[in-house]
Image (spheres, rainbow, N blue to C red):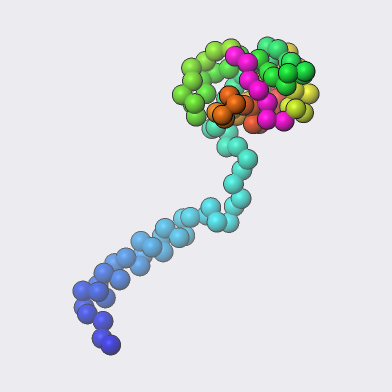
């Protein structure tokens, strides 16, 4: 079967674009990081409630929730998170909206 000239031309023009897309797409070779820095919010621990597994955090804008800076109480995903911080610690954290409320899913003390 002979390829019509227009089809040959289209394939010739599309091949470099497809090759470039694949060459630039490195995501298949790199595992996704747990939390890109851009998704993390800066904050300061104001209260640690180990019994209730909650943290009161004065935080900057939480972009993924379109939330302005304020101080509020958050649940934590894992009970051990309340042991990682103390009042006054500067932190970077991720919070997600869940059916049970806003939950801190990752928290890191800033050194």
Principal secondary structure, stretch drawn in magenta: strand
| Residue drawn 59% across the image and 46% down it | 32
Q: Quadrant of residue 15?
A: bottom left
- Considering the image in quadrants, where does the N terminus appear? bottom left
- Considering the image in quadrants, where does the C terminus appear? top right
Q: Is residue 88 visible?
A: no
Residue lying farthest to the bottom in this orientation: 1
Please provide percent x and percent y for residue 110.
68, 24
3 versus 33 height, above or below: below
| Membership of 82 in magenta stretch | no
Please provide percent x and percent y for residue 63.
49, 26
Q: Is residue 86 left or right of residue 70?
A: right
Q: Is residue 28 left or right of residue 6?
A: right
Please provide percent x and percent y for residue 36.
57, 37
Please provide percent x and percent y for residue 107.
67, 28
| Segment tinted magenta in the rendering | 72-78
């Amino acid at each position: 079967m002979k390829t019509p000239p227009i089809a040959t031309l289209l394939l010739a023009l599309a091949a470099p674009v497809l090759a470039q897309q694949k060459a630039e797409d490195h995501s298949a070779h790199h595992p996704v990081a747990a939390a890109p820095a851009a998704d993390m919010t800066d904050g300061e621990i104001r209260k640690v409630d180990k019994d209730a597994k909650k943290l009161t955090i004065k935080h900057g804008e939480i972009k993924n929730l379109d939330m302005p800076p304020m101080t509020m109480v958050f649940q934590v995903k894992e009970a051990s998170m309340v042991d990682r911080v103390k009042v006054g610690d500067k932190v970077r954290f991720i919070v997600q909206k869940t059916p049970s409320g806003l939950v801190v899913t990752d928290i890191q003390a800033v050194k």
